Image (cartoon, rainbow, N blue to C red):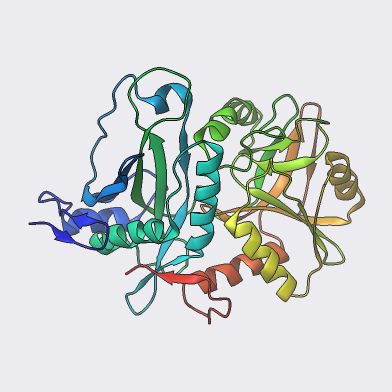
């Protein structure tokens, strides 16, 4: 029999994973490869608004071949983590920021906005049901990765905003994003492809942005690189971001530069948090345009001592090498994170894990 919360009925699946299977997955979680027993879903149409919320068995979706999302790309998503604290409670980090960004993405893709309260309730409803899937982690690496997303579900061809949509949340136990752990990665500089253009969808978290990054990512992999850095689409000069992470540049005098938000860069929740933590640590943090020529020159002079990327999945990842067609530069020893990146990463993880006081009020309890 189903039980009911405010917006989501709970329909436990009878054939859920055994405790032994869950323990096996949690012993060595891999990012985005195994999913929990359930998913949360709520549907929308213009007449009823959001309705029919439920947490039910994780299962394939019924997708009509003429569904709008398949033809016109009306799709958005978010990425978040749920953390187990020592008292058994489960928390997430600044989810109101994700909810606000999800709403901005929805507006840009002509999808219905999900109210913050509904967004948060979907997360809580799913985590409460699948609490057993949240990893216990002493080192701060394992977590339950949450993926809220929305798709346009109207059936029929025609270039127009869909009249129906579905908001869904799935979850996956996750370990370190990069198999190498917290070690410097190599970045390929994409000079022939752009991630986003002014007036486009760069500030929205939508699948099209990531799909467009895959060809240059494949190019980078051919050159032995882990990720791709993109320049602006107008002058092909200003550093913007990686395919899924924001960038920070640390100088010898302790100052930090990060590319400013121009509408073509995704406003990362981790990015804004690190800016605040770095300033509390005594760093002067400047958000401004940052050119590839400046990166090359300052690395060559030794003034630039660290570069790191950040995002929900990887938290902070140091950059040890930048390569491009005809050259490359290195930073650090290529084996360890720099002092600033390592310190900020630890500070952020300590807050998320409840190991230090949450003086900012960033944590939100899910279960």
The quadrant the C terminus occupies is bottom left
Q: Residue at x 53, y 78 (%)?
A: 358
Residue with the most extreme front position: 47
Question: At which x and y percent is residue 124?
Answer: 33, 62
Q: Is 30 on the left-hand or right-hand side of 254?
A: left
Residue situated in front as seen by the camera: 34 or 44 = 44
Q: Residue at x 25, y 35 (%)?
A: 60
- Residue 346 visible? The answer is yes
Q: Is 250 on the left-hand or right-hand side of 17?
A: right
Q: How many marks?
A: 0
Question: At which x and y percent is residue 272?
Answer: 65, 61
Q: Residue at x 25, y 30 (%)?
A: 62
Residue with the most extreme top position: 157
- Examine the image and state in which quarter residue 26 appears: bottom left
The quadrant the N terminus occupies is bottom left
Question: At which x and y percent is residue 231?
Answer: 75, 35
- Examine the image and state in which quarter residue 282 appears: bottom right
Residue with the most extreme left position: 1
- Residue 333 visible? The answer is no
Residue situated in front as seen by the camera: 130 or 86 = 130
Q: Residue at x 86, y 63 (%)?
A: 252
Question: At which x and y percent is residue 131?
Answer: 27, 63
Q: Is 126 on the left-hand or right-hand side of 194?
A: left
């Amino acid at each position: 029999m189903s039980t009911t919360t405010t917006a989501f009925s709970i329909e436990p699946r009878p054939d859920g994973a055994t405790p032994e299977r869950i323990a096996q997955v949690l012993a060595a979680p891999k990012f985005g490869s195994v999913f929990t027993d359930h998913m949360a879903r709520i549907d929308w149409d213009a007449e009823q608004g959001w309705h029919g919320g439920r947490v039910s068995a994780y299962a394939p979706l019924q997708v009509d071949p003429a569904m709008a999302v398949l033809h016109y790309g009306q799709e958005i998503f978010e990425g978040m983590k749920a953390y187990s604290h020592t008292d058994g409670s489960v928390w997430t980090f600044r989810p109101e920021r994700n909810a606000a960004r999800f709403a901005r993405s929805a507006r840009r893709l002509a999808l219905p906005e999900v109210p913050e309260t509904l967004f948060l309730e979907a997360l809580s409803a799913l985590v409460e049901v699948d609490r057993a899937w949240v990893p216990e982690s002493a080192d701060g690496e394992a977590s339950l990765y949450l993926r809220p997303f929305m798709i346009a579900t109207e059936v029929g061809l025609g270039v127009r905003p869909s009249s129906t949509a579905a908001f869904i949340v799935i979850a996956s136990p996750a370990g370190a994003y990069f198999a190498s752990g917290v070690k410097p990665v190599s970045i390929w500089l994409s000079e022939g492809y752009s991630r986003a253009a002014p007036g486009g969808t760069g500030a929205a978290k939508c699948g099209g942005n990531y799909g467009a990054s895959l060809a240059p990512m494949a190019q980078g992999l051919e050159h032995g690189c882990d990720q791709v850095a993109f320049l602006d689409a107008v002058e092909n000069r200003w550093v913007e971001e990686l395919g899924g992470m924001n960038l920070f540049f640390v100088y010898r005098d302790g100052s930090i530069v990060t590319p400013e938000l121009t509408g073509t860069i995704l406003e990362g929740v981790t990015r804004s948090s690190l800016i605040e933590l770095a300033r509390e640590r005594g760093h002067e943090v400047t958000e401004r345009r940052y050119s590839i020529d400046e990166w090359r020159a300052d690395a060559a002079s030794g003034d630039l001592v660290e570069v790191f990327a950040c995002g929900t999945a990887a938290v902070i990842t140091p950059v040890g090498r930048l390569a491009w067609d005809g050259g490359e530069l290195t930073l650090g020893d290529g084996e360890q994170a720099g002092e600033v990146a390592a310190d900020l990463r630890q500070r952020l993880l300590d807050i998320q894990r409840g190991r230090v006081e949450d003086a900012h009020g960033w944590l939100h309890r899910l279960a």
